[in-house]
Image (cartoon, grey):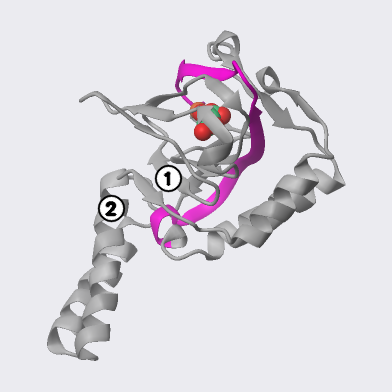
Amino acid sequence: MILHLQQVIDSDTLQAVRDKLATLTFTDGKLTAGWAAKPLKQNQQLGSGKAADAVLELLLKRFRSAAGVEAALRPKQFARVMINRYQQGEFYGMHMDDALMAGIRTDISFTLGLTSLADYEGGALTIDDSSGQRSWRLDAGDVLIYPSHFLHQVEPVTAGERLAMVGWVQSLVRDPQQREILFDLQAAVKAEHQANGHSEQFFRLSKSYQNLLRRWLDD
Ligand SMILES: O=C(O)CCC(=O)C(=O)O
Ligand SMILES: [Fe+2]
């Protein structure tokens, strides 16, 4: 399941984050690339420090409280979260994300766009799912959540700059198909309850959802 959620962060928060980021130092993106991805990675990442941590903490909090996000991720731990920037001509060629980051398995990758579509050109995130490629240009506040097992790239930014928060999650439900079934089933439980309250179908769905979740949760 590749999930494109729109407007998960409000515009005031986005503006405050962009204003803050304009005052902070970015470093070479190659610092966090594995050996194979290093030559393909031409972008920048937010340096470390208190102010940078505060921005990440705020964004992560807002992101995690948005509808659908916890259900899509079922996070056990966040392996890494960072802010990247692509200025004109910068890109990140086709690569695999590391399976292990800081000793944590990466099951899910996400990109949360921080720049309005009107303020950059190019910069599409393209995923190769072996049946072909699909691209997303993210608007400010949009997030793309995808399994970490896909090859993917960020196409060159041809005008303006593209800011994003990117992150990797170890999920409590390791298998992407199982995560998708649980995501759909949970939505069906909620919809049935909204439509018909504690109906017979609600209890059936709810029982299946909870029991599958119990069966599939990591130890
Ligand atoms: O900027 C993005 O959308 C994704 C970047 C990426 O693929 C990575 O940092 O591994
Ligand atoms: Fe990546």
Q: Secondary structure at mark 2?
A: helix
Residue at 63% of width from left, 30% of height from top? 161
- Against 94, is 127 above or below? below
As drawn, 102 above or below 143? above
Would you say 119 lies left or right of 172 here? Answer: right
**Residues rendered magenta in the picture:** 71-98
Q: Main secondary structure of the magenta part?
A: strand
Q: Residues within 10 Å of mark 2 (few under 14, many from 20)?
A: some
Amino acid carrying mark 1 in the image:
Ile
> Of 116 and 143, which appears nearest the observer?
116
In front of the other: 64 or 154: 154
Secondary structure under tag 1 reads strand
- Residue 63: image location, x then y, percent: 56, 57
Residue 170 is inside the magenta segment: no
Q: Earlier in the sequence, mark 1 or mark 2?
A: 1
User: What residue is shown at x 23% (from left), y 71% (from top)?
Assistant: 188
Compute the Cα span from label 1 to label 2. 12 Å
Q: Which residue is mark 2?
A: 180
Name the amino acid type tagged 2. Glu
Residue 145: mark in rendering: 1
Query: Residue 213 sits in which quadrant?
Result: bottom left
Position above or below: 25 against 168: above
Is residue 204 among what the camera can see? yes
Relative to the observer, which residue lies in front, 137 or 168? Answer: 137
Is residue 126 left or right of 205 when viewed as pictured? right
Quarter of the picture containing the N terminus is: top left
